[in-house]
């Protein structure tokens, strides 16, 4: 009940009995407990709190994941830039990107969910928020992915990123003159690239079975 | 022996018409040959009797004419006939050859192969042959259990297990297990029980069928068969999820079938089954399945470990894979464990390490031999099924057979619907009604059911009736369901397989997503699916890979191996398309210079994949180009009458191809060739006829063409100017790379260039 109380007192949510009192309530409670645990009972979370999670240390893209939590573009309020600390509301909203798909979604809804999740991924890659993923940013992504393996030649990451970029350019642009320059992957190109990826059925965490549309008013 | 002479004469006379004949005549000749070999094999018993009789006659004669026989000398036989000596291997080879000719014939006739799946056609051929043999009143070879389980089934299962899509399989493991275990149990008990019930109600004819026999029959007929599923599903290309669900179920239900079969067979003699026996049965199930998996895993690890040391004897590498897997199967069968699960476990365990260790040629060999063996096995199984149908003892009972077929369908549908309802509560990606329909419809029975029925001991008086019913069910599912599933799939617009080539972007994002989801789970503090998978991967990387993979490949991250594999594939594709002189259809004109940032274009450092890999790819390309070159040259050397004009043109064409290939190579490989930016000006020089040309290996074409250029009659004068792209990096690179053992280098290929070394 405490979570619900918290949410109500902070005027984050208006109680919509049909959706909020279904399966999701329990999970909000669990997440709230976790929030408290990570923040040591503070109101907000800082980056250091995330860095202290022991399991995250073996993760090669650790820093990007942490940054994603503090990225205002993921707060669904059309903001930009980063923040230094987040409250439970922002934590929950970022987590909501990992909802599992519901059974009876119309094609339109499914498309919306796909764009949503791909937008999250895009934001993770596009660190300078200029709307495109440049070659440098993509190289950085690949380097991070390979960062934990030992004895790797630095150029290998570059070639892989270059090959990937070449592929995107071929798919999106088709034909280019020798002196044209491909600026970077825009969001539309990104969508086209990962069209067959079925991200709405792959990008979810199992127990986050909640509907948070009522949370963001 | 008259039969064998008939074989000889026919084979000699038919070699003429076969080459000129169209497909129908080929088919007719094949059938005729099949008939003759079977007649030959059958009549040899007769033949043997004859020779024995003549031998007896001779020995009887000898005491009568001892002196005469020493005087008379037999003439030296110039040509003798001894069919007995080669009889067995000859027949086996002939059967296999003719079965494969049949298969070939079907694909030449396109109309038929579009409508009817191959398995049906093969059964039809089997029926035909069986009918002919029966008409001659001879003994037909039957699909006996030993032949099937020991020789015909393992290649198919190994092929399926080795190339099993692991990701899809593990993601749906829960669903597959529920369907395999609970589904098969439901089918067996439902069918057995209902048949028993109906038999009790029916007349006195069927009253002799007791409950245990019915349950035994139910077990045999309830298991979904992997061979039939593969044969049919392979042709309809449905999406991966459905394929893995039905196929995975057909593989994993082997454990259940084995346990139930032995349980019921044991106790059908004893008469009753107690509760204690039921508990023992459950325990047996766990032993059988887990034991089978363990045996397979052990052999798989052994195979992986062995492949670590095969860098000096590449030619026998594929054999290790096959032998270890076969041993795993046989060892499991020794203890009555599930051989199929053992084989699957062996293939799955062995594959990632073996593929990292073996050379590219061995990898191709393994792949093609497996496909080849499984294809032959499948063909033989279906043909034998047809032959055995005609040959076998039959006891047709309308009630029983119709009842069996109907019950199989009903229980399958009910089982799928019921289980899906339960499973969907736990699945994220739910199974839709279309999926359920395909799963229910795809539950085909096949040769395993037949062999198990054949295995029933003969004192079971219901055996012939059971066999008839089993065969009818098999025919119904394979023929009716097999034929109609393709139009149904199209009608229902079931999602088809995504024929996407490997994409480096998708691989990057797959890995990225894995790490991201693991990270999110860690942030939530929730130890889910991804967390454990990540832990397993890390364990694999730190401990297992060090032991099982040789050399530097053991620390190579997956992304890099994937990238290297793709580059290799691109190179192979370029080689093949280059020789056909046809540009690949997906060519887009985007190349490296379009994506490199403009400022760094001038002082661009050339990125490289690991040098050994790059060299490997270049050697493949270069080797191929040199093959072409050597082939051309041998023509001009041996055949002095060859028109030098033609010789020159083909040389020039070869040079053009090389330039073209270099250009394309720098498009698709991100490792650009060391060349200038301006496209080469291509000119060709036609020399007059009377000159004979010899070329040196590394000669620059420019020097060649600078020679006299008298006005040729045709007037076209082009000089080929290809920059020495590939060759330039050669000498100093070679020094460095002699130290590095590249996999390609250590392959003793047929052309020994001086760069290739052990």
Image: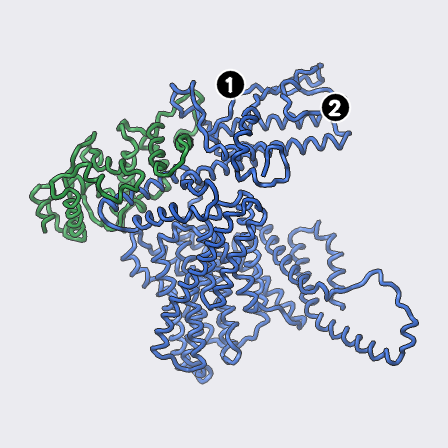
Q: Name the quadrant of the C terminus of chain B.
A: top right
Residue A122 percent location from the top left of the image:
29, 34
Q: Which quadrant holds residue B4?
A: bottom right
Q: Are marks 2 and 1 in contact (CB under 8 Å)?
A: no
What distance separates the C-alpha of mark 2 from that of mark 1? 33 Å
Residue B692's label in the rendered image is 2
Q: Please tell me how crowded label 2 is: few (under 14), some (14-19), or many (20+) other residues with Cα within 10 Å.
A: some
**Mark before the other along the chain sequence, 2 or 1:** 1
User: Element type at marker 2?
Assistant: loop
Residue B712, position as x, y percentages in the image: 71, 17
**Residue A174 image offset from top left, x and y in percent:** 43, 29
Which chain is the one coloured green? A
Disc 2: which chain? Answer: B
Q: Quadrant of residue A79?
A: top left
Could you tell whether B338 is left or right of A195 in the image? right
The N terminus of chain B lies in quadrant: bottom right
**Chain in blue in the render:** B
For numbered disc 1, what is the local secondary structure?
Answer: loop
Residue at mark 1: B678
Residues at discs 2 and 1 both on one chain:
yes
Q: Can residue B751 be spotted in the picture? A: yes
């Amino acid at each position: 009940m405490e979570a619900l109380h918290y949410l109500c007192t902070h005027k984050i949510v208006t109680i919509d009995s049909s959706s909020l009192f279904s399966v999701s309530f329990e999970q909000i409670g669990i997440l709230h407990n976790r929030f408290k645990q990570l923040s040591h009972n503070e109101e907000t979370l800082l980056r250091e709190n995330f860095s202290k999670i022991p399991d995250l240390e073996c993760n090669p893209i650790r820093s990007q994941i942490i940054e994603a939590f503090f990225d205002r573009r993921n707060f669904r309020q059309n903001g930009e830039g980063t923040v230094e600390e987040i409250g439970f509301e922002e934590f929950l909203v970022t987590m909501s990107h990992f909802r599992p798909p519901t059974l009876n979604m119309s094609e339109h809804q499914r498309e919306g969910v796909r764009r949503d999740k791909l937008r999250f991924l895009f934001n993770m890659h596009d660190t300078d928020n200029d709307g495109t993923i440049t070659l440098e940013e993509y190289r950085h992504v690949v380097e991070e992915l390979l960062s934990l393996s030992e004895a790797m030649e630095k150029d290998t990451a570059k070639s892989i990123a270059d090959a990937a970029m070449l592929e995107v350019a071929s798919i999106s642009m088709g034909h280019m003159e020798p002196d044209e320059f491909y600026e970077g992957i825009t969001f539309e190109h990104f969508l086209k690239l990962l069209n067959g990826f079925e991200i709405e059925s792959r990008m979810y965490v199992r127990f986050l079975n909640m509907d948070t549309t009522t949370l963001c008013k | 022996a008259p039969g064998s002479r008939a074989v000889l004469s026919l084979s000699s006379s038919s070699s003429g018409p076969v080459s000129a004949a169209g497909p129908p005549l080929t088919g007719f000749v094949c059938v005729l040959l099949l008939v003759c070999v079977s007649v030959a094999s059958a009549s040899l018993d007769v033949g043997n009797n004859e020779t024995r009789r003549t031998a007896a006659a001779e020995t009887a004669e000898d005491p009568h004419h001892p002196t005469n026989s020493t005087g008379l000398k037999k003439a030296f036989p110039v040509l003798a006939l001894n069919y007995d000596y080669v009889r067995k291997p000859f027949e086996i080879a002939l059967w296999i050859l003719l079965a494969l000719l049949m298969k070939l014939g079907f694909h030449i006739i396109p109309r038929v192969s579009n409508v009817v799946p191959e398995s049906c056609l093969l059964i039809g051929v089997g029926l035909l042959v069986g009918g002919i043999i029966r008409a001659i009143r001879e003994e037909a070879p039957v699909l006996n259990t030993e032949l099937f389980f020991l020789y015909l089934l393992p290649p198919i299962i190994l092929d399926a297990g080795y190339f099993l899509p692991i990701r899809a399989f593990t993601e749906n493991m829960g669903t597959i297990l529920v369907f395999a275990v609970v589904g098969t149990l439901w089918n067996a008990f439902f069918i057995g029980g209902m048949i028993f019930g109906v038999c009790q109600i029916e007349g006195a004819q069927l009253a002799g069928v007791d409950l245990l026999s019915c349950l035994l029959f139910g077990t045999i007929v309830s298991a979904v068969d992997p061979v039939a599923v593969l044969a049919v599903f392979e042709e309809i290309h449905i999406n991966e999820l459905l394929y893995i669900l039905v196929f995975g179920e057909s593989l994993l239900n082997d454990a259940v079938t084995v346990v139930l079969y032995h349980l019921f067979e044991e106790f059908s003699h004893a008469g009753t089954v107690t509760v204690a026996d039921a508990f023992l049965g459950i325990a047996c199930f766990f032993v059988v399945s887990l034991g089978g998996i363990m045996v397979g895993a052990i052999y798989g690890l052994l195979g992986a470990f062995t492949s670590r040391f095969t860098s000096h004897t590449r030619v026998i590498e594929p054999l290790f894979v096959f032998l270890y897997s076969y041993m795993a199967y046989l060892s499991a069968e020794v203890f009555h464990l599930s051989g199929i699960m053992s084989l699957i476990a062996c293939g799955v365990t062995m594959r990632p390490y073996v593929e990292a260790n073996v050379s590219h040629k061995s990898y191709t060999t393994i792949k093609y031999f497996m496909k080849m063996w499984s294809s032959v096995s499948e063909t033989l199984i279906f043909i034998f099924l047809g032959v055995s149908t005609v040959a076998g003892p039959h006891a047709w009972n309308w009630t029983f057979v119709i009842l069996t077929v109907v019950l199989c369908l009903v229980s399958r549908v009910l089982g799928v619907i019921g289980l899906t309802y339960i499973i969907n509560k736990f699945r994220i990606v739910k199974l839709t009604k279309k999926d359920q329909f395909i799963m229910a419809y795809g539950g085909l029975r096949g040769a395993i059911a037949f062999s198990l029925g054949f295995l029933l001991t003969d004192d079971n008086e219901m055996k012939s009736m059971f066999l008839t019913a089993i065969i009818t069910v098999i025919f119904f599912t394979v023929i009716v369901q097999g034929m109609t599933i393709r139009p149904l799939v199209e009608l229902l617009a079931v999602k088809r397989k995504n024929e996407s080539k490997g994409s480096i972007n998708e691989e990057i994002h797959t890995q990225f997503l894995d790490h991201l989801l693991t990270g999110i789970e860690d942030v939530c503090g929730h130890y889910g699916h991804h967390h454990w998978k990540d832990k397993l991967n890390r364990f694999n990387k730190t401990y297992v890979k060090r032991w099982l993979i040789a050399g530097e490949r053991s620390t190579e991250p997956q992304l890099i191996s994937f990238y290297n594999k793709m580059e290799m594939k691109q190179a192979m594709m370029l080689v093949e398309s280059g020789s056909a002189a046809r540009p690949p259809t997906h060519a887009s004109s985007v190349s490296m210079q379009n994506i490199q940032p403009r400022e760094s274009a001038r002082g661009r450092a050339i990125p490289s994949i690991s040098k050994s890999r790059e060299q490997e790819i270049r050697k493949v390309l270069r080797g191929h180009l040199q093959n072409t070159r050597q082939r051309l040259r041998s023509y001009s050397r041996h055949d002095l009458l060859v028109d030098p004009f033609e010789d020159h043109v083909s040389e020039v064409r070869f040079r053009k191809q090389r330039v073209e290939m270099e250009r394309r190579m720098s498009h698709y490989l991100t490792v650009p060739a060391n060349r200038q930016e301006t496209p080469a000006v291509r000119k060709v020089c036609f020399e007059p006829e009377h000159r004979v040309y010899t070329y040196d290996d590394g000669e620059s074409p420019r020097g060649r063409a600078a020679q006299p250029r008298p006005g040729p009659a045709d007037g076209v004068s082009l000089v080929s100017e290809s920059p020495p792209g590939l060759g330039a990096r050669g000498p100093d690179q070679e020094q460095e790379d002699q130290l590095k053992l590249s996999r390609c280098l250590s392959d003793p290929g047929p052309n020994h260039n001086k760069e290739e070394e052990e």
